[in-house]
Image: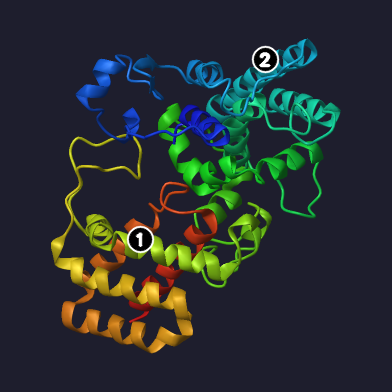
Amino acid sequence: WCPYCHKVWMCLEEKRIPYRVEKINMRCYGEKPASFARMQPSGAIPVAKIDGVVYNQSNDIIFSLEQIFADEKKSLSPKSEEEKTRAQRLLRLERQLFSAWMSWLTAGYGRDGFIQVLNEVESELKSSKGGDFFMGKDVSLVDFMFAPFLERMAASLIYFKGYQFRVADGASTDFPAINKWFDAMETLESYQLTKSDYYTHCWDLPPQLGGCSYESDGERYEKAINGERTLDGSRGSWELPLEKDCGGIEPDWKWCGDEGAALREATERLSFNHANIIKFAARGAGRKGMPPYSAPLSDPNATPNEAVLASVDTALRLVSLAMLDGTESYEKDIIAFANTLVKEGGADFAQDTVNSLAYLRDRVGVPRDMRLPAARQLRAHINWAIGKILDA
């Protein structure tokens, strides 16, 4: 999803400014409504309307929020001349880091250049006085300018290149200050609410950027993030029980509570809109839509296969119950369901049900649908159900 929308969203949350969201597709995900095209002829997002005035560039929106709400909401801007000078230097550095990342990620060259600029970011954070944010003890606009891109860099570079700079607690790193900055950001509700996971980023970045270049060092991480294999190759990484920190690849989100909280969140999100979710999942056994879009997980015009609605519904009900009470409590039920599915519906019908469940599993997005711990549990529990059907 859009990093420029991300930073505006964080600022709105941090400043506690009331707002209403209207979601608009990026071009690679579907058509934009005509009403939006009239407001923003270029089609670029985000766009904000504040007191009737339209702002159509993310930085313009953020700086306008600072000015318009200067007296009544928390300020994120530097105050002294010294702070303003430092902030300007850091914002230039952020753009340098972005350019170096784009060169390596999309064009396939510039690894050393990216690491050099990342080391400059590390040095700036080490020199920050009084705290772990870029400007010291308090979060500022500078942090919100860096955050969407550092988050996407951490996800994409390990996935496509095998290069890791964001590490789990206790792991060694050449970038301790950057990791402390991530930890500090993750204490903020404004960041917790908007943070995405590696899987979501690594599937949404290529269509946005026109493709990303793969390197062989990233293959094992790609498979682990996609749920195919753990780093040691022993089993699927979206299989129960789930590994801590995805085997050291992506730090767990400790602020979300324990495993029980994640399971309850996943069940609530699955059951809240269950009728539409079942129809959405049934697209996996239906017909692809026209026209196609460049995002591989996006097919807004697909037609669901109504014949599998009941079987998908039953499978997801068992998934929900298993998340609440444990898979062992519903082992006999899921096996009986799988056997009936194959016996009465046939192998092709059972495969259509599997395809529908997999379609849903692969499209659980963070933070759109739920937070990472809940998403990991839902993906793994859907795989539990899929495995039983395939074994029948």
Colour setting: rainbow
Residue 92 tag number = 2
In the image, taking residue 76 as reference, residue 345 lies left or right, namely left
On the image, which quarter does residue 18 sit in? top left
Q: Is residue 110 visible?
A: no
Quarter of the image that includes the N terminus = top left
Upstream in the sequence, badge 2 or badge 1?
2
Foreground mark, 2 or 1, reads 2
Quarter of the image that includes the C terminus = bottom left
Residue 358 tag number = 1
Q: Residue at x 57, y 35 (%)?
A: 14
Foreground pick, 127 / 13: 13
In the image, taking residue 114 as reference, residue 208 lies left or right, namely left
Residue 207 higher or lower than 47, as above or below? below
Residue 49 screen position, x and y as percent? 37, 21
Separation (CA) of disc 2 from disc 1 = 43 Å
Foreground pick, 316 / 353: 316
Foreground pick, 237 / 318: 318
Q: Residue furthest left?
A: 307
Residue 46 screen position, x and y as percent? 41, 25
Tag 1: amino acid: Ala
Count of marks placed on residues: 2
Question: Dot 1 lies on which element?
Answer: helix
